[in-house]
Amino acid sequence: MPAMRHRTVLLLLLLLAASMSGARAADGVVVIGHPTVKRLDATIVTRIYTGRVIEVDGVPITAINAPAGTSVRNRFLQVFLNQDEDKYTAYWTVRRYIGKGAPPREMSRSSDIIRFVTSTPGAIGYIEESELRPGLNVLLH
């Protein structure tokens, strides 16, 4: 019987974690993607932006960052990576040094991010929720 109780508690914790990961995206930051990217969850987005996932469902992913220091990037880093800019930069400095990749490319304007994501298979990025427009493939809202 104790094993059953442990499984029930584990299941409840997993369900709670899953429901919380969906709520994490509700800070005015929206993750968008090219139509070739069918689905993502908050955990996969975190793994993409830390270089630990490079493809999803067989589609190579190209992640785009907003510029360092912008409000949308600061909120994205906090919501998805639980990091600030300094920690994120330090993380990528180490990864680059040990040969484990480079950080996602930055684009200076949300219109550039939208244009790149909509025209590049496998591309994802994030924008302010207020910049959503019809036809964008919203992956996390």
Image: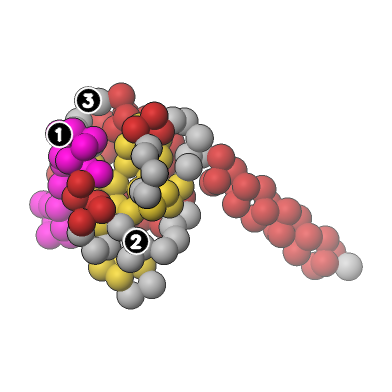
Amino acid beneath label 3 = Gly
Mark 3: few, some, or many residues within 10 Å (few <14, many ≥20)?
few
Residue 26 shown left or right of residue 109 in the figure: right
What SS does tag 2 mark?
loop
Q: Which mark is residue 35?
A: 2
Q: Residue at x 37, y 37 (%)?
A: 132
What SS does tag 1 mark?
loop
Specify the quadrant of the image occupied by residue 58.
bottom left
Q: Position of residue 99 (x, y in %)?
A: 12, 60
Tell me which label, 1 or 3, sits earlier in the chain: 3
Question: Is 123 or 80 nearer to us in this picture?
Answer: 123
Tell me which label, 2 or 1, sits earlier in the chain: 2
Q: Position of residue 19 (x, y in %)?
A: 62, 47
Amino acid beneath label 2 = Pro
The residue tagged 1 is 108
Q: Comparing marks 1 and 3, which lies closer to the viewer?
A: 1
Q: Which residues are magenta?
A: 94-114
Q: Quadrant of the N terminus?
A: bottom right
Question: Is 8 or 69 nearer to us in this picture?
Answer: 69
Residue 66 shown left or right of residue 83 in the figure: left
Q: Residue at x 22, y 43 (%)?
A: 113
What SS does tag 3 mark?
loop
The residue tagged 3 is 69
Establish if 43 lies above or below 4: above
Tell me whether the residue at label 2 lies in contact with that at label 1, contact meaning CB atoms closer than 8 angstroms.
Answer: no
Q: Position of residue 60 (x, y in %)?
A: 26, 68
